[in-house]
Image: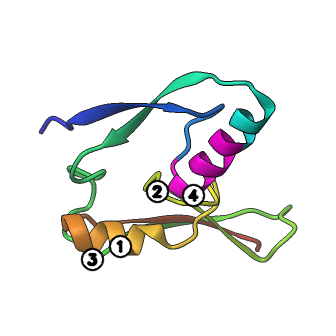
Amino acid sequence: MAMAFSIVSGMSSSFGYGAAEVLKKRQQRERQGTRRMVAVVRAEGGINPQIRKDEAKVVDSVLVSDLSKPLTAYCRCWRSGTFPLCDGSHVKHNKETGDNVGPLLLKTK
């Protein structure tokens, strides 16, 4: 199953998956008189075309002994406004697309 991608040009110093963050950075650059063009790539449709599709939401947990917090969630849907940390954006994405992507959970032992 092939995954379709769309490329959108925008003014951003990095791949901005949070629209508010991209707009904020663009406005800051315009005030400073600097602009850079960067292509933003977003997956169309589902992000998870074949991994464990029989599960309601794919979530993996990893036990790590040296974390500052007992539980840290990392984004795997690429839609989080706090990327690479998860902000729950996968919930809306899953409802809109029927996908089942969830965060990577790092837990201390």
Q: Which residue is mark 4?
A: 20
At label 4, the amino acid type is Ala
- Residue drawn at (62%, 22%) of the image: 36
Along the polypeptide, which appears first: circle 4 or circle 3? 4
- Specify few, some or many for label 3: CA neighbours under 10 Å numbering under 14, 14-19, or 20 or more: few
- Residue drawn at (36%, 41%) of the image: 42
Query: In this picture, is 2 found above or below 53?
Result: above
At label 1, the amino acid type is Lys
Residue 84 in sight in this render: yes
Is the residue under label 2 in contact with that under label 1 (CB below 8 Å)? yes
Along the polypeptide, which appears first: circle 1 or circle 2? 2
Q: Quadrant of the N terminus?
A: top left
Q: Which residues are magenta?
A: 17-27
At label 3, the amino acid type is Ala
Q: Which residue is mark 1?
A: 92
Q: Is residue 22 magenta?
A: yes
Q: In the rendering, which numbered label is found on residue 56?
A: 3
Q: Nearer the viewer, residue 33 or 85?
A: 33
**Cα separation between marks 4 and 3:** 29 Å
The answer to which image quadrant residue 20 occupies is bottom right
- Residue drawn at (75%, 26%) of the image: 33
* Nearest to viewer (mark 3 / mark 1): 1
Where does the image place residue 108, in percent across and percent down from the top left? Answer: 76, 72
SS for tag 3?
loop
- Specify few, some or many for label 2: CA neighbours under 10 Å numbering under 14, 14-19, or 20 or more: many
* Nearest to viewer (mark 2 / mark 4): 4
- Specify few, some or many for label 1: CA neighbours under 10 Å numbering under 14, 14-19, or 20 or more: few
Along the polypeptide, which appears first: circle 2 or circle 3? 3
